[in-house]
Image (cartoon, rainbow, N blue to C red):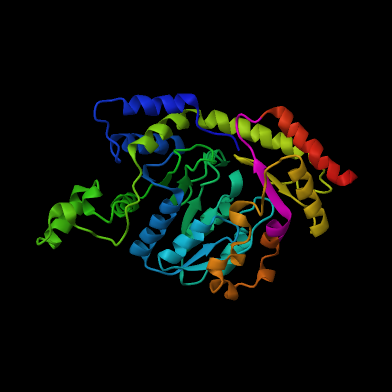
Amino acid sequence: MSNNITRADLDLLIDYLKQHDPKLTHGPKVLEFESEWSKWLGVKYSVMFNSGASANDITMLALAAIDGKGEVIVPPLTWVSDIASVIHAGHNPIFVDINPSNLAMDENKILEAITPNTKAVFLTHVLGFNGISKFLVDKLKSLKIKLIEDVCESHGATFEGKKIGTFGWASNFSFYYAHHMTTIEGGMVSTDDPDLYEILRIMRSHGMVRESTSTNLKSEYVKKYPDLNSDFIFAYATHNMRPNELNAVLGLSQIKRLDANNIIRTTNFTRFLKSLDSKLFRTDFHLEGSSNYAFTLVLQYPNFELRDKIEGILNAHGVEFRRGLSGGGNQLRQPYLKNIARSFPLNNFPNTEHIHNFSWYIGNYPDLEIEKIDQLGIVLSQVAKS
């Protein structure tokens, strides 16, 4: 990857700090960025956090507070904080295999996994691909099961002309350094649900009721707990997950070029796929509406010898890569899930296992030179010849 923070971004931060007594803890700039993000995405409410992982944690805690604890359907191909947040909130993660064409959970397997204890489906849009369909959204609505979208890797991806992150009860975003846009560290939860919005604001700041924007909600707590200082009523046992004003200043700058940068990333990715030998690598991903911040490289068929040969060639040419795509491959193989994984045999996840063993991603960023993309295609073509 290349640095996604420009000189202009840094100058804005410097100008902000040059003010007399600039506010640094979360305040007006955070509110402004939340508003701008909601407009860009097309939702009513957004709450900024200090990371995408914190956004995940609070979303799952809010789900438990509203609907109680239960089962949450998750993919084994995702970032660790998605599954960790389910566990932290006291829910049980239920794993289903992925669809090779978009790397998200297979919608038919999602429906097969639903039980009376299912509280939500936590769907990850992997590396810029859209992972939903009208069939899935409509089916979950009819079953009254909440859809939560992890859009941390897919800012700006769309489905039927509408941005993903607008189809679920809640959607989570990350503004980590390597993603489509960055606030250095930072995250966001977006929603159209006013009750969830108020709970998110409260839970973000130690569970303090004073953080709510609802006068009625705050009055109810004050009446119910007259023995407490109204400024220090803690409704939920959470932590401090607030962002700061500098994160928001950077976010306000970065969002202005997000759409233009996404167009470049998509053009880059399309060019990369066209350079690949489709006999060796998968090139038939579902690209409509995608917004990929990485080049996805997947072998057509299992072949450990070929895998090692590819990695040797990439290393020899100084090409940085990550095997297993998002989060280090199949999360069911990770130590933190060793007890839970016993209930989910690996042979039930052939598509995820293929990704775990025979896939990589390579950086894709707006300043990436076309010549490097073409050279990468030439380097990978050596595999067939060697």
Residue 235 image position (x, y, % from top left) = 24, 60
Question: Does 323 sit above or below residue 337?
Answer: above
Residue under the image location 61 percent in, 29 percent down: 367
Please indicate, yes or no, whether residue 256 appears anywhere in the rendered image.
Answer: yes
Question: Does 323 sit above or below residue 14?
Answer: below
Q: Is residue 380 left or right of residue 95?
A: right
Residue 365 on the magenta span: yes
Q: Is residue 149 left or right of residue 312?
A: left
Q: Is residue 272 left or right of residue 186?
A: right
Please indicate, yes or no, whether residue 145 appears anywhere in the rendered image.
Answer: no
Residue 9 image position (x, y, % from top left) = 45, 28
Query: In the current view of this chain or complex, which residue is farthest to the right?
Result: 385
Residue 18 placement: quadrant: top left
Residue 224 image position (x, y, % from top left) = 14, 62
Residue 312 image position (x, y, % from top left) = 78, 48
Where are the magenta residues, as a range? 354-368
Question: Does 2 sit above or below residue 222?
Answer: above
Depth check, front residue: 194 or 33: 33
State how many labels appear: 0
Residue under the image location 39 percent in, 26 percent down: 12
Residue under the image location 56 percent in, 67 percent down: 335
Q: Quadrant of the N terminus?
A: top right
Residue 125 on the magenta span: no
Residue 221 placement: quadrant: bottom left
Depth check, front residue: 12 or 297: 12
Query: In the current view of this chain or complex, which residue is farthest to the left?
Result: 227
Q: Is residue 18 left or right of residue 308?
A: left
